[in-house]
Image: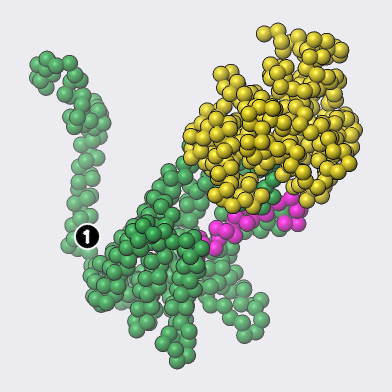
Chain colours: A green, B yellow
Amino acid sequence: MTTRHESTEVGPPVTEVGVVGWLRHNLFNGLASSIATIVIATVLVVVGWLLLEWVLFDARWGVITENMRLFLVGLYPQSEIWRVWLTMVALSIVTGLSAGTWRSSALRMMAMMLAAGQLALAFLVVASGLGLVATAALAANALLVIVAMLGAQRHPVGRRWLLLGWLVSAVLTTVLLAGLGGATPLPAVSSNQWGGLLLTILLSVVGIAVSFPFGVALALGRRSKLPVIRLLATAYIELVRAVPLITILFMAALLLPLFLPEGVRIENVLRAMGGIIIFSAAYVAENVRGGLQAIPAGQIEAAQAIGLRSWQCNLYIVLPQALRITIPANVGLFISLLKDTTLVIIIGLLELLGIGRAVLAQPEWLGASFEVYVFVAAVFFVLCYALSQASYRLEKELGVGER
Amino acid sequence: MSDMSGSGPGSSPAAATPGAVDEASDIIVCRDVHKWFGQLHVLTGIDLTVKTGEVLVIAGPSGSGKSTFIRTINRLEEHQRGDIIVDGIELSNDIRNIAAVRSEIGMVFQSFNLFPHLTVLQNVTLGPIRVRKVHRELAEEMAMQLLTRVGIPEQARKYPAQLSGGQQQRVAIARALAMQPKIMLFDEPTSALDPEMISEVLDVMRQLAGSGMTMLCVTHEMGFARAAADRMVFFDAGNIVEQGTPGQIFEDPQHDRTKLFLSQILKH
């Protein structure tokens, strides 16, 4: 502390800048602050040390590695797992191409996340001794995402082709996962056998991809000039929002079969998807309605004045602005949708959390519940955090809140 | 005629389209136009005829119905009684008629109403591409000509929020002109502008008036009225109380309300 008055140069005292200054300002700013800092730091170090010790030495991670196949794909037959990896090839290529073509930093980020996610999966797979083929396939996929992205940056793909690519990979995914049945090289795999991370991601992706356009349509319907459409949209939204998701899932699982004609059966997974879509669409609709209301009337008048029809006005003027405003709200909704997929356990589907509980029911892993829940929580955290980071990037890119 | 006549799109009011057969030179005919907002009678039977190429300045105190009136001409407001016939097309509830009329009329708003999520160039080309089905490259070429005409070709790739108010309003004029309208409506185009930006917008409007465009301008810019208007119409309480050449109105106003208004507005 003696250096304070020795300095001849005019500048802030060393105790005010740099590391020392920062510490003084933020951690040791007076007696009370110093005591609080020391106490909290001690607690953090002790807890951190105990946690680290547990993670490194005490935890029985065998419960995860030995059940890795269950965590990843549920009861999907071992001999058919290659089909899961193959669907990811298509997904990797299309994602990479889209990210490269659109030159959007948010899309690029999502593609990088897909690559990183597959690398992490490859690591989990090899750590669990699930076979080198799967590991190599996943690692190659990660590379494929990046190659496709760089390739499309140089030679952009037409938007129509990209759309076609997404449709084809959706169909391919369905065919590969469900199989064709009979004596084909793709024997049928009942969706009741789908589970684990595979099911979590399927329910979320399909839920988001279908409920979003459905919700936008409902929001437009609620503002329609035609009373019948407005009434139907409003009734739907209010009704669904007044009912908990669990109830909708129960109804989809238990009541729906009673109303279907004899012989018609819808698989459990499809019913769960339907329930999630029905539920989430109503919330998307309300978010989007908020965005629609924020668009000044002058925008619509200007669109009318240059002769745009009302659908064109919605498509080119109102929706792009409204959807942009609602990105934060909708991403929040999709994050909670991702977490709400755990509720399908009540209709007998085993997604990631459900598989965790099933694993814990095995007698040899009786005491390992902490390990399982930490693992499941970590996976959910990674998924949700990735989603929210991508949305921040998207908001920045589109200038949400700036105009 | 200024140097701009016939040099770009939108400057050929005589482009003959079917429709205007009987009243060849009367491009807008309003007969006994009434409008109510709820119980409030805001237009009380307006009769007005505008000839092709005429520049009309509409003045009057706020609340006198002048904005509402020009908004009925492209059906942003619906009139409830009387007839409005634009270029031979009668405005009714028929959606095709409304679309046809709107495509012949360009409109410039007080608050610009540019589309904030589109670049300047996209703002100007949207109508031609989506409504007129013009090919994108051609539309962009035309848009650049128009942006040059209003003096801001270098701003084409920017977003509206990056432009000054005067520049935004000039983009709005270019956007309206891109539809090659026969009539331009201006609804207080300079009222939201800083004083130093008003003249750049008025210059563009004056050039446009010189090029033979039919214009209806609601404005308080009496300098513009004196220099560019063929006729002035004075509104009060939902109807026209006096009209004439700018000279007549300024030198020898007949109606008390006009006298009062002019004395207020010309005092400064």
Q: Kindly identify which chain the residue marked by label 1 belongs to.
A: A
- The residue under the point 57% across, 48% down is B138
In the drawing, does residue A308 fall left or right of residue A128? right
In the drawing, does residue A116 fall left or right of residue A175? left
Above/below status of B193 relative to A222: above
Mark 1: few/some/many CA within 10 Å (<14, 14-19, 20+): few
- The residue under the point 55% across, 60% down is A211
- The residue under the point 86% across, 14% down is B255
Q: Quadrant of the N terminus of chain A?
A: top left
Q: Secondary structure at mark 1?
A: helix
Q: Tell me which secondary structure the magenta stretch mostly adopts.
A: helix
Judge whether residue B17 can be spotted in this image: yes
| Location of residue B189 in the rendering, given as x and y in whole percent from the top left corner | 66, 27
Magenta-highlighted residues: A206-229
Amino acid carrying label 1: it is Val
| Location of residue A84 in the rendering, given as x and y in whole percent from the top left corner | 38, 75
The residue nearer to you, when weighing B77 against A123, is B77
Q: Quadrant of residue B184?
A: top right
In the drawing, does residue B190 fall left or right of residue B264? left
In the drawing, does residue B39 fall left or right of residue A164? right
The residue at which mark 1 appears reads as A55
- The residue under the point 79% across, 27% down is B65
Question: Does A1 appear in magenta?
Answer: no
Above/below status of A173 relative to A24: below
Above/below status of A131 relative to A227: below
Question: Does A210 appear in magenta?
Answer: yes
Q: Quadrant of residue A200?
A: bottom left
